[in-house]
Image (spheres, grey):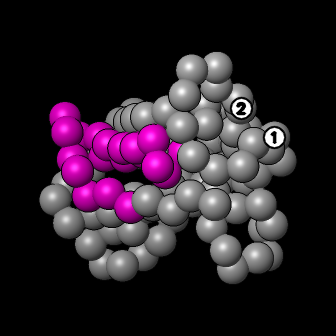
Amino acid sequence: MLSNDIEIIQGDSKYFSVVKQNEQGEQIDFVDGEEVAFSVKKNLKGLDYIIHKTSTDVQEGKIIIYLNPDDTNVPLDDNYYYDFQYTDLEHDVYTLAKGICQVVWEVTN
């Protein structure tokens, strides 16, 4: 599992290309029917998501998650928490990455 901080510009579109890897770090292709969720919360124990998107869009073995400007038009903050969670065909769930998500300002509206 990766632990990386990410940055999202408030009100911008954003694409994530999500991969899964074996223990040797080699990419394992996603297959149709598998799903990845991208979740962002202010409070880890809270029930409310700031952003929550799921995708089953497999392209070249990766799952693509697209955030549109409405998805990212959230309050500015550098203390959000995120994760990418993968659900396989047997409905087992795995966290692929997690960390801090900063939502930063934009100049042009």
Answer above or below: position of 56 versus 16: below
Q: Disc 2 marks which residue? A: 104
User: Which portion, as a residue range, is magenta?
Assistant: 54-72
For the question of whether residue 18 can be seen, the reply is no
Q: Nearer the viewer, residue 9 or 60?
A: 9
Q: Residues within 10 Å of mark 1 (few under 14, many from 20)?
A: some
Residue 2 as seen in the image, left or right of residue 14: right
From this view, report whether residue 71 is shown above or below residue 88.
above
Q: Disc 1 marks which residue?
A: 78
Res. 109 image quadrant: top right
Which residue lies at the image location 33% right of the left edge and 68% below the top edge? 88
Residue 54 seen in the figure: yes
Residue type of the residue flagged with mark 1? Asp
Q: Position of residue 96 (x, y in %)?
A: 53, 52
Q: Splitting the image into 4 quarters, where does residue 100 fall?
A: top right
Q: Quadrant of residue 10?
A: top right
How packed mark 2 is, by other alpha carbons closer than 10 Å (few <14, some 14-19, many 20 or more), is some
> What secondary structure is marked by label 2?
strand
Q: Going 40% across and 44% down the picture, which residue do you hit?
A: 68
Q: Earlier in the sequence, mark 2 or mark 1?
A: 1
Q: Is residue 95 magenta-colored?
A: no
Residue 51, horizontal then vertical, whole percent: 56, 58
Residue contact at pointers 2 and 1, CB within 8 angstroms: yes
* Above or below 102: residue 39: below
Instruction: Choose mark 2 or mark 1, whichever is in front.
Output: 2
Say which amino acid is labelled 2.
Answer: Val
Q: What is the number of the mark on residue 59?
A: none
